[in-house]
Amino acid sequence: MAEKGRFRVLVGGVEVGSEEFQISAIGGEWVAQGKAEVRPPGGAATQVNCRLRLNAEGMPLHYEWSARAEKKASATLEFQDGAVRAQVQLEGAEPHQQGFIFPSPRIVVLDNNFYHHYAILARLYDWKARGLQTFPVLIPQELTPGSISIESVGAQEVKGAKLEILRVKSPDLEIDLYLNGGRMVRITVPSANAEIIRE
């Protein structure tokens, strides 16, 4: 599972951000780290960093993110047996704490600003069983629990390469992940006219 790379984020063909990430094995756990720059058209750039620790089975243990924009913000999330404790710190405000209970410890963390989390999701998908699979999900910035479904929709030729496609669905979003030999190389979000391309 160890890998590193860089994504370019395009909306309507215009680059609006980038992300560098690294996933590595450390002492029987997996650590995924990312650094993103979000550049909305006509707005100020935001720098975001994250670090996700997972056990050997891919279940989250700890997640932290920090953002530098007009105001600083950060959060830490601790996971244990399906329970999540979150603490959010916004510049100039008191820390905010919140807790969640999930039906399973096999929770997927999908941060709004980081696409390498989808590469982890693709690894959690049971490729032998295939079919439609559902995971509990937590979006850290919004502290929103929910669920997503993921399904293999077969292979497609893209620019001369045969890529396997996984379709991720939530109640309000559909995302296609394109993989080449298990390595995520492209993401499309048709409703947002967005494309994330691996360099």
Image (spheres, rainbow, N blue to C red):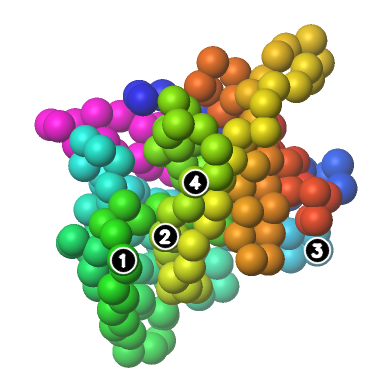
Return the mark for residue 133.
4
- Is residue 176 visible to the viewer in this orientation of the structure? yes
- What amino acid type is highlighted by mark number 1? Pro
Which residue, given by chain and number where applicable, does mark 3 sit on?
42
Dot 1 lies on which element?
loop
The residues tagged by marks 3 and 1 sit, at their Cα atoms, a distance apart of: 42 Å
Question: In the image shown, does 86 or 131 lie closer to the viewer?
Answer: 131
Q: Which residues are magenta?
A: 21-34
55 to 71, vertically: above or below: above
> How far from the left and from the top, in percent, is residue 53?
26, 46
Which residue, given by chain and number where applicable, does mark 1 sit on?
103
- What amino acid type is highlighted by mark number 3? Gly
User: Of the residues under marks 2 and 3, which one precedes in the sequence?
Assistant: 3
Tags 2 and 3 touching, CB below 8 Å: no
Tags 1 and 2 touching, CB below 8 Å: yes
Secondary structure mainly formed by the magenta segment? strand
Dot 4 lies on which element?
strand
